[in-house]
């Protein structure tokens, strides 16, 4: 074979493998909901997504028909809960996002959603373990501190658990933190990189302002409280019509984009997420949110929380106590309701 021809072959092979790797099917379960619809729209606008599968117990095909008219290249298909609908939506998926489940009403905590959402997430996780066991699973449905352990237990029972592919979506907490700080300091939120660790509800959400460019803010109890309970502002303002949907859609789309960027070979992609983590396992806490470096296999590196000041140390302690209970609740739910 001539050198030129060999080179042409190599270039062709490279081009083929690059494009094969860049094909990405993304599935949204709960696609017709308050989060599901704008999230699906944002995914349709993302050129990294080549195939979009939209499933809901009602309304999936309608949302898909609407979004499919947006003139970007990806294909869009909607699925109903027919006997094979869910399995078809999941088959071949690289990323599955789960915003299915009921949202909060005023006065409710995320834990109050447990009774309804635990079984919804358990059943969807069973379908994912069956039809897309290697996909990156991004859990939005609350209470995230419990629904993520539920998914892990379901996968473990089927022998397909890969801790590198399971993520509780906590992106909205860092989105809110950077926005709230920018309002106080009069800065551009894109320059405010705030680390938020722990879990995704109330006191389990721990912003680490001492690590930001405004370490003074760690003493600002009102700001810390606003980050921890920012979701309540939206629940109250919507007055019974649900919780954050639009900001959550943005945060979920950003997390999916980061997972895809890393899957497609980009280095140094870091997002916060609630994952199976070694950081507090010695205290019996198997899941924890910190900065996660993403790679082609999902979780590449779990960053430690880093230096914290005395205020933050107290927040971390309160977080761990609650988090442990939330995780145990998810694990024992699956043990008694397999
Ligand atoms: P929604 O009620 O507007 O939508 C939920 C959708 O899920 C509905 O379309 C419903 O038909 C669907 N659904 C219910 N059971 C299903 C099943 N078995 N299979 C497929 N679809 C199913 O609720 P919204 O506002 O979209 O919130 C969804 C979830 O996201 C809630 O649990 C909420 O607490 C959570 N959330 C999470 C956030 C986070 O930061 N992780 C932020 C905001 C909300």
Image (tube, grey):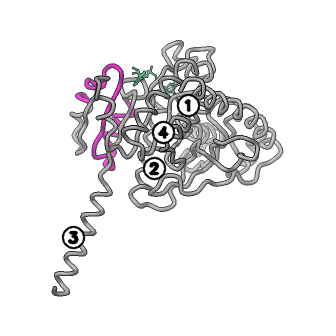
**On the image, numbered disc 2 is attached to which residue?**
258
**Residue 2 location (% of width, % of height):** 16, 87
- Residue labelled with disc 3: 12
The correct choice, above or below, for 105 with respect to 156 in the image is: above
Q: Residues within 10 Å of mark 3 (few under 14, many from 20)?
A: few
Q: CA distance from mark 4 to mark 3?
A: 40 Å
Residue at disc 3, secondary structure: helix
Counting every numbered tag in the picture gives 4
Sequence-wise, which precedes: disc 3 or disc 2?
3
Q: Earlier in the sequence, mark 2 or mark 4?
A: 4
Which is in the foreground here, disc 2 or disc 4?
4
Q: Element type at marker 1?
A: helix
Nearer to us: label 2 or label 1: 1
Looking at the rendering, the stretch of residues picked out in magenta corresponds to 38-66
Q: On the image, numbered disc 4 is attached to which residue?
A: 158
> In the structure shown, which secondary structural element does the residue marked by tag 2 occupy?
helix
Q: Which residue is mark 1?
A: 147
Q: CA distance from mark 3 to mark 2?
A: 28 Å
Q: CA distance from mark 2 to mark 4?
A: 28 Å
Residue beneath the point at 23% across and 40% down: 75
């Amino acid at each position: 074979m001539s050198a030129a021809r060999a080179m042409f072959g190599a270039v062709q092979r490279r081009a083929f493998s690059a494009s094969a790797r860049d094909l990405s099917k993304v599935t949204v379960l709960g696609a017709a909901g308050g989060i599901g619809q704008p999230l699906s729209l944002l995914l349709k606008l993302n050129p990294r997504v080549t195939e979009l599968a939209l499933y809901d117990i009602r309304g999936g095909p309608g949302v898909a028909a609407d979004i499919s008219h947006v003139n970007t290249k990806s294909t869009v298909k909607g699925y109903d809960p027919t006997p094979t609908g869910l399995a078809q939506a999941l088959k071949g998926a690289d990323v599955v996002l789960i915003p299915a489940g009921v949202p909060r009403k005023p006065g409710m905590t995320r834990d109050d959603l447990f009774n309804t959402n635990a079984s919804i997430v358990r059943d969807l996780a069973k379908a994912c373990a069956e039809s897309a066991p290697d996909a990156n699973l991004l859990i939005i449905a609350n209470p995230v501190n419990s629904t993520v352990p539920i998914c892990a237990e379901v996968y473990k029972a089927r022998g397909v658990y890969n801790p590198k592919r399971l993520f509780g979506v906590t992106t909205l907490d860092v989105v809110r933190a950077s926005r709230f700080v920018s309002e106080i300091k009069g800065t551009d939120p894109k320059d405010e990189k705030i680390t938020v660790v722990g879990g995704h509800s109330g006191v389990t959400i721990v912003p680490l302002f001492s690590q930001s460019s405004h370490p003074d803010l760690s003493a600002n109890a009102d700001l810390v409280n606003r980050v921890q309970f920012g979701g309540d502002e939206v629940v109250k303002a919507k007055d019974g019509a649900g919780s954050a949907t639009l900001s959550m859609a943005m945060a979920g789309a950003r997390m999916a984009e980061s997972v895809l960027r890393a899957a497609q070979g980009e280095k140094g992609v870091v997002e916060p997420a609630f994952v199976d983590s070694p950081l507090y396992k010695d205290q019996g806490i198997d899941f924890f949110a910190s900065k996660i470096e993403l790679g082609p296999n999902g979780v590449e590196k779990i960053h430690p929380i880093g230096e914290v000041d005395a205020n933050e140390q107290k927040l971390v302690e309160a977080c761990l106590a609650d988090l442990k209970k939330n995780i145990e609740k998810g694990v024992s739910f699956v043990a008694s309701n397999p």
